[in-house]
Amino acid sequence: MLEIPLLLAVIVLVALVFDFTNGAHDCANAIATVVSTKVMSPRTAVMMAAVLNLVGALLGEEVAHTLGSGIINTDMVMGCQALVLAALIGAIAWNLITWYFGIPSSSSHALIGGLIGAAISHAGLSSLHAISIVKKVLLPLVLSPLAGFVVSYMVMAMIMFLFWRTNRRSVSRYFEKLQILSSAFMATSHGLNDAQKTMGVITLALFLFHKIDTIHVPLWVKLACATAMAMGTAMGGWKIVKTMGHKIFKLEPVHGFAAETSAAMVITGASLIGAPISTTHTISACVFGVGATKRLSAVRWGIAGNLIVAWILTIPASASIAGFCFLLFKVAGIAD
């Protein structure tokens, strides 16, 4: 049996690795459109995303509380510290699989699936907060992309109505400046939602190890997670940027502004109620919504099929991997 401090250190390290892969996989969402429209250089966009993700991460704890205590019953898993490690391994494995194939799946739901799978392996279905999962995970899972599509369609339609007599080149120059603001809004909202997820898992681990008395995120956890995510963004996000910014729909600055603003509004709203939604699926849906205002054939709907498949598979796939890992931990004597 591993010594508890060593196991906790391993869990924190693996959680930060997950945050790094989350940065490579999901943080690209905050800068994909502004890079693809050539409004900002990749280096400048990455620096902006890193700073504003950090700012967003410090603005709230609602999502972290959901991950820390709203998915699994902490009373039933108390003392089972290896559960968090198994959950993280399941999430990281699915992140790497989808990253390798360039599929914008959800790191958020991979992490949630990991927690669910590990908890079920340890204590069965009764270890889950079923009502909370339905209200704060499954419903937002379905509704956030739909909301993103509808909001972005309406925002883009309003812009088209307001500027329909304006020269296209003038509109493009105007929205090049506005898109810097919209991408900043998107990066901040991304930090507010995505950066909190790993914070919640580390906080859960600290709670299970009796290092804290309540599910409250320490400042060092916030800073460590935000930093790991920023590093992941800088080093590995460009595969997803390409899919988000070019393969779905050829973006111009006005489209980027509409998609980013709409996604940021949906993500911020979800963060305020503690719903850990997929920023990937939300911004994807917003790009689809913006593209649909031009003409339906302008959107590469085949990409939507890949996104939907990943969307459906993420939670069960990461849950299965995490559950299997936990069983291996039992056999190895790492878990009870």
Image (spheres, helix red, strand yellow):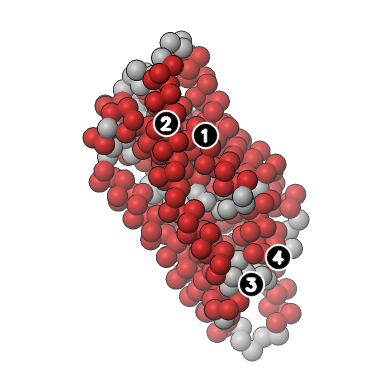
Give the Cα separation between the discs numbered 4 and 1: 32 Å
The residue sitting at 48% across, 17% down in the picture is: 7
Where does residue 212 sit, x and y in percent of width and height? 39, 22
Label 4 secondary element: loop
First in sequence, mark 3 or 2: give its number.
Answer: 3
Specify the amino acid type for callout 1.
Lys
Q: Is residue 162 above or below residue 213?
A: below
The residue indicated by pointer 1 is: 222
The residue indicated by pointer 2 is: 324
Label 2 secondary element: helix
Left or right for 16, reference 311 = right
Where does residue 232 sit, x and y in percent of width and height? 64, 40
Label 3 secondary element: helix
Where does residue 56 sit, x and y in percent of width and height? 53, 46
Q: Nearer the viewer, mark 3 or mark 2?
A: 2
Quadrant in which residue 112 is drawn: top left
The residue indicated by pointer 3 is: 254
